[in-house]
Image (spheres, helix red, strand yellow):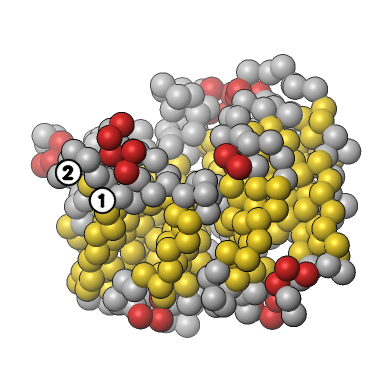
Amino acid sequence: MDKKTQDFALAYYAGDRKTGSVTVLRRRNGELELKQLPAAAESGKDKALKPVFVGLTESDQPITLDPQSKQISIGDSFVVDAFPAHIYPDPNSSRDWFMNDGDKESGNDTLNCGDQGSSVTVVENTASSTASYLKTICVGRGHHQCNFSYPSDQAPSVPHQTYVSNLKDGSLSVIGNDPAKPESYLQVVATINLCEPGKDGFDAPQMPNNAFPHGLVYSKVTGKVYNLNNGYGTIAVVDPISHEIEQRIPFKGFSNLFISPCGRYVIGRGADRKSNADHVVAKMAVLDVTNHEVLDQIDLPDVYISKYFFNAEGSKLYLTTSSSGSEQQQANLKTDAVLVFDLTALPKLKLAAELRLGSPAGTLDFLAPAGKTELVFASNAQDGMVSLICGETDAVIEKLTVIEPLPHSRLWLLAN
């Protein structure tokens, strides 16, 4: 089939971080339809009280959550200042976890948690008219990342749990995530203090500390959680059964982690802005979870890595790029690049393609019927466009104009 006539359905959010809109792109029988959802007036509420944008129903109706009443609303128009929160889908259920980093200065969610931390909210069936609010859970003070542990063939005793890293506190919150265990389900069952006292000048572990966790993954191969402590340049290896830190691995110079789909390799990414006044250098490394050895490292000049995505087969890693560094360094950056890595070459990091889209990619999503990636979609907010990429050849095959250029965008697949 010609990729330019292939059917698909996408939702495209575009905004300026204050207000935004949602457009649905749907191709049926080769014909493209664009439908911008009607706009509802701004809520007029402070940030903490603005409606949370949850998603769209099967009939393209926007779903929002009132953070105060906790009521789910489905309407025909999109509240233009609805807040598009960071979402982490649970890979083993229909639950999505929404991150709330709290007040910018204190990191507290004063609405739900007072001065005791910020929160995460759990919603079920977010892409459906049956979307339902489950719970808002107080954790440590944000910024947060989230990941999930679960039993696997290699680690059958690992429980279903959710891990949330708390940047300002230097801790991990562990939350029960098994509806069959009501005594712990959606309850904080442990708080893991990530402090390394010697590096902070403390006599004993304390919170808050300078761990600055940002990078949180789970390996189905080892059944362990791996958390990157940026402040210390180490990875804390956590046992999800005992909640103990088993080991700390030196891993300096990286600011985030992701795990290969096979579960064996932790991939770190970072940026060097100090060695060269004119150039930012992206840094990547591969850690084998079976022996904790770094097996490969590469530098990518004039690249600042933003987000990461895997195709459905788990054979390719896609990295988007953005801007960082001094004015001179930014002048040399390739901010419109999407880097494609061949994961079949692991533990070697093999760059298979470098795509130039003309403007930075916001997010990617994948059309993969029967598990085979046919199309990759990239949102390009600054051009108001969506780029279509061939899942097999990685060639950009089409660009679709959606809306006027805006600073921020996000896209995701819908049922067609």
Compared to residue 355, the image places residue 404 above or below, namely above
Tell me if residue 68 can be seen: yes
Which of the two discs, 1 and 2, labels the residue nearer the N terminus?
2
Q: Quadrant of the N terminus?
A: bottom right
- Left/right placement of residue 134 relative to residue 157 reads right
- Left/right placement of residue 119 relative to residue 52 reads left
CA separation in Å, label 1 and label 2: 8 Å
Residue hosting label 1: 281
> 127 or 17: which is nearer to us?
17
Image coordinates of residue 202 in percent, x first then y, are 14, 35
Residue at the image position 58 percent from the left and 73 percent from the top: 391
* Quadrant position of residue 354: bottom left
Residue type pointed to by label 1 = Val
Q: Secondary structure at mark 1?
A: strand
Residue hosting label 2: 276
Residues at badges 1 and 2 in contact (C-beta under 8 Å)? yes
Image coordinates of residue 77 in percent, x first then y, are 85, 35
Residue type pointed to by label 2 = Asn
Tell me the tag on residue 18.
Answer: none
Residue at the image position 82 percent from the left and 30 percent from the top: 39
> 163 or 89: which is nearer to us?
89
* Quadrant position of residue 381: top right
Residue at the image position 70 percent from the left and 53 percent from the top: 400
